[in-house]
Amino acid sequence: MGKLDGRVVIITGAARGQGEQEARLFAAEGAKVLLGDVLDEQGEAVAKELGGDRARYVHMDVGREEDWAAAVAAAKESFGPVDGLVNNAGILRFNELTATPLAEFQQLVQVNQIGAFLGIKHVAPEIEAAGGGTIVNTSSYTGLTGMAFVGAYAATKAAIVGLTRVAALELAAKRIRVNAMCPGAVDTPMANPALLDPAGPSPEATEAMDELYRRVVPLGRAGLPAEVARLALFLTSEDSSYITGQPFVIDGGWMAGVSIL
């Protein structure tokens, strides 16, 4: 028996990174999964590997309301009533706050913040109709504390924590639990674009990133997408049945403080 047997879950940003690992783990635990992303070739490949009886991919720009409506319809058509959502899709840009173009700031708000809002807006009524379920939003370590050169990103992730708390309060009576994950450094292409190089990151780039993590993360390394997926599974399953409205930090101890050792 899987922890998600009988569940139907929409996961955004599911073509790679954290979303891909969440889709794989959820399917392994018995869920039927609707994968949404704008990376069509990669998303289709993941869904095909998981199998048509357990996964379907749809092109989905989370900042577009019509894409949410289409994704919900596709999930219901393929698998039945939807009772879970993981708002995973997001983008990251590095820039000094006062040098950030307005268009860049607005782009991050549209994808990260409005995308999460639209997910809650469109999927919560479906979860209520299904008799209850879960929403897991993806915030960030930076949504709870500051980090230089990611001001727009941090602003959207702080907003997601606020959305999570309000949604949890409003949806509790409808048997919907809403929580947020706050990852620190995770080894994905979004945080480490060098991973997108077909040849892979250079040894010099890898060593520089590893040294950074050794200095700032108490556990001495970046997190793995699969580790974040296991937190998403916990918050989606009955293992967390008495938890709602909470941000969960998963950062290797980074937020605890700076070690002098």
Image (tube, rainbow, N blue to C red):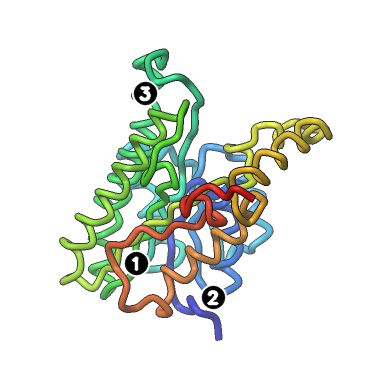
Find residue 159 and report its horizontal and vertical position in percent: 29, 42
User: Label 2 amino acid?
Assistant: Gly
Nearer the observer: mark 2 or 1; the answer is 1
Amino acid type shown at disc 1 = Thr
Residue nearest the observer in this picture, 99 or 39: 99
* Mark with earlier residue (1, 3): 3
Residue 204 quadrant: top right
Q: CA distance from mark 3 to mark 2?
A: 38 Å
In this picture, is 161 found above or below 96?
below
Q: Are marks 3 and 2 in contact (CB under 8 Å)?
A: no
Mark 3 lies on a secondary structure that is helix
- Left or right: 250 in relation to 115: right
Residue underneath mark 1: 134
**In the shown orientation, is residue 183 left or right of residue 209?**
left
Q: Going 38% across and 28% down the picture, which residue do you hit? A: 152
Residue closer to the observer: 119 or 219? 219
Tell me the CA gap for discs 2 and 1. Answer: 16 Å
